[in-house]
Image (cartoon, rainbow, N blue to C red):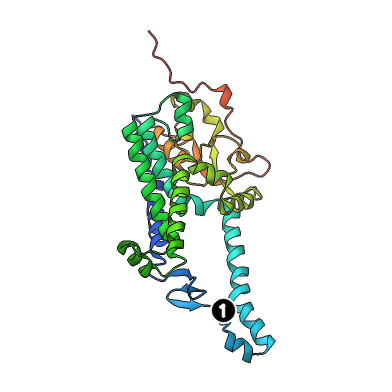
Amino acid sequence: MHAQTVNPKDTLQQKRLITRGAFFLLFLLAPVLNIFRYDLTETHFVLFGFPLSFNLHLDWVAQSSPAEVAGQILFWFILPILVLVPLALWIAFKWGRLYCGWLCPHFSVVETINGLMTRITGRPTLWEALNKGSTGKAIHWAGLTLVCALIGFSWALALLSYLLPPLPLYTDLVTGQIGLYPAIFLGVASAAFTFDFLFARHLFCKYGCAVGLVQSIAWMANGKGKVVTFDTKRAAACRDCTKACDEACPMRLPTRSHKRAKFSCTQCLQCVSACREVQKDNPEGSLLTWEPGIPGKQTVLIPVREIDTKPRQPRA
């Protein structure tokens, strides 16, 4: 007898949970801990507790030569941009929207709300649920709306704390002494985020996020950039699967299709994890892998229309 091959346990999503959770906490706590924010009252950035005004105080500028002022601008402003922007583009060039899938707080909310909506309607988005005629119970929708509103308010408050001193802001909010303009900002931003989280989560990631768009363009320019690749030689194994990979994708992309069809892929690898789960008893393992692309081919993939994805019916 041959020993059964045991596929290693998939830990991709556990790793993502750690990176996303840590970055989400950083997003919320960075202003409070003075790690990074912009203080509108003092009109300068704060970085690790220190004011960052590029050392261009008016008194110093008035007493300095043009060369000294230019040197400060070069060192404190232009040089960091020349280092950080190419670094970010290089990461996107090699790995795509890695920030989106492994760090972005908004995408973390997308996945969370998708999961809640799936439990309510059986589908991860409202539009898919309406097409399937599955709307769920009103009480569940009320709960989901409340969750989205609370997350939206927390986001609005977090963003405002990047612009105003956080502790006085929180104190004014608790004591009911918040100013008119901060209150307007909180109201408008909370409503916008709530609407986004309820109706347009992944759509914003696809079509409205400039950061994601730049990453996708850089990634598409690299024929060898890492991409989810489908093993076409084993495509028949998909017959016993109900498109678990496509169903798992938070961006609702055809996960087994060409790279150009996955322009907005966030490299979250949910599809890979889903395939690993389906094929966990298959000695050959997952049909989807995350590996460098092949220039000119771009991981051609499954001829979806040629494969019956319905589970096989047992013979009578």
Quadrant location, the C terminus: top left
> Is 67 displayed left or right of 263 in the figure?
right
Residue at 38% across, 64% down: 178
- Dot 1 falls on a residue whose secondary structure is loop
Quadrant location, the N terminus: top left
Q: Is residue 225 above or below residue 239?
A: below
Q: Is residue 70 above or below residue 244?
A: below
> Is 87 displayed left or right of 131 in the figure?
right
Residue 200: give x, y in percent of width and height: 50, 41
Visible in this render: residue 190?
yes
**Residue 76: quarter of image:** bottom right
> Is 303 displayed left or right of 241 in the figure?
right
The crowding category of the residue bearing disc 1, from other C-alpha atoms within 10 Å (few below 14, some 14 to 19, many at least 20), is some
Residue 130: give x, y in percent of width and height: 46, 28
**Residue 143: quarter of image:** top left
> Is 275 displayed left or right of 293 in the figure?
left
Front residue of this view, candidates 9 and 211? 211
Outermost top residue: 316
Amino acid residing under circle 1: Phe
Residue 207: give x, y in percent of width and height: 58, 44
Residue topped by disc 1 = 54
Q: In this view, does 281 lie above or below 293?
A: above
Residue at 41% across, 59% down: 157
**Residue 91: quarter of image:** bottom right
Front residue of this view, candidates 282 and 193? 193
Q: In this view, does 186 lie above or below 307?
A: below
Residue at 41% across, 50% down: 152
Residue at 51% across, 25% down: 236
Visible in this render: residue 285?
no
* Total numbered labels placed on residues in the image: 1
Residue 28: give x, y in percent of width and height: 39, 60
